[in-house]
Image (cartoon, rainbow, N blue to C red):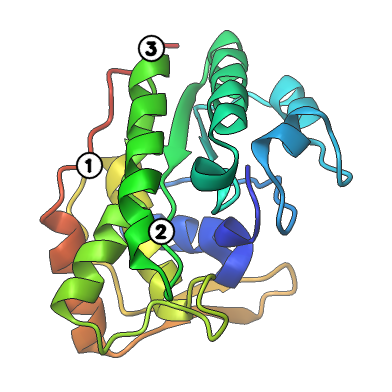
């Protein structure tokens, strides 16, 4: 659940395609509205249906991200609605997972606040945090020539989404990413091939090495 940081370049489907390439079934569903906050998802504003989906499904993990400025502009609401969703998700027998976002391209100094907000929320709710923002920070520091940003300086580029998907693949499967293809496809309902990711092989290899250098924890999970 979340906003355009999740749906840009089909992140949920890309995670599924990565898993399929390794013979692992992962079924993803999404409740995303551009610019939305967890407060809006909780109150079912902007035509969101997140709480209804949580009630109707038999979920294993529920991944959520708040608005990219929420840790900075509305930290109290960031904590409040993150905790409410974590409690609701656990009550449905699923595991809450917080998707740590990244700093805007023009202001990398945002990242420590974002990282602290997500890590503290994960700790206080005993939830997992996938440290995407920290992975971006390291990638930009090592290879700034690989642009993870869409031209607006906020959303992910196709390369950024591929990097995000690797992090979630590693989190969900517990496996290294080294065998993930640099081109990923799925078949649509009409039997046609959709190209979800087309990266230069050396860029994909770099991203895989980077993600595998991170310890991405998955707390013990019980149904």
What is the number of the mark on residue 102? 2
Report the mark closest to the observer, 1 or 2. 2
Considering depth in this image, is 70 or 8 the residue closer to the camera?
Answer: 70
Measuring 23% from the left and 34% from the top, which residue is drawn there? 217
The residue singled out by tag 3 in the image is 222
Measuring 73% from the left and 67% from the top, which residue is drawn there? 189
Residue 208 vertical placement versus 36 (above, below): below
Mark pair 1, 2: CA separation: 16 Å
In contact (CB < 8 Å): disc 3 and disc 1: no
Query: Horizontal placement of 130 versus 60: left or right?
Result: left
Between disc 1 and disc 2, whose residue precedes? 2
Residue 9 in the image: state x and y as whole percent.
Answer: 57, 72
Residue 156 vertical placement versus 199 (above, below): above
Mark pair 3, 1: CA separation: 19 Å
Residue 48 in the image: state x and y as whole percent.
Answer: 82, 41
Q: Quadrant of the C terminus?
A: top left
Residue 178 in sight in this render? no
Q: Secondary structure at mark 3?
A: loop
The residue singled out by tag 1 in the image is 216
Considering depth in this image, is 93 or 96 the residue closer to the camera?
Answer: 96
Which quadrant of the view contains residue 44? top right
């Amino acid at each position: 659940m979340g906003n355009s940081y999740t749906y840009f370049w089909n992140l949920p489907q890309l995670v599924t395609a990565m898993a399929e390439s390794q013979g692992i079934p992962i079924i993803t569903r999404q409740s995303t509205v551009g610019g939305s906050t967890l407060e809006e998802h909780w109150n079912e504003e902007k035509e969101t249906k997140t709480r209804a989906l949580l009630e109707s499904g038999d979920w294993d993990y529920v991944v959520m991200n708040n608005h990219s400025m929420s840790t900075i502009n509305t930290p109290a609401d960031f904590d409040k609605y993150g905790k409410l969703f974590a409690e609701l998700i656990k009550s449905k027998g699923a595991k809450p997972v917080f998707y740590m976002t990244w700093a805007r391209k023009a202001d990398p100094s945002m990242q420590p606040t974002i990282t602290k907000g997500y890590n503290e929320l994960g700790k206080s709710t005993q939830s997992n945090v996938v440290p995407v923002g920290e992975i971006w920070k390291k990638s930009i520091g090592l290879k700034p020539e690989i642009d993870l940003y869409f031209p607006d300086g906020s959303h992910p580029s196709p390369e950024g989404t591929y990097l995000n998907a690797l992090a979630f693949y590693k989190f969900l499967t517990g496996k290294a990413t080294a065998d993930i293809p640099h081109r990923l496809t799925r078949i649509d309902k009409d039997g046609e091939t959709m190209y979800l990711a087309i990266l230069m092989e050396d860029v994909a290899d770099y991203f895989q090495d980077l993600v595998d250098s991170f310890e991405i924890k998955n707390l013990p999970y019980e149904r």
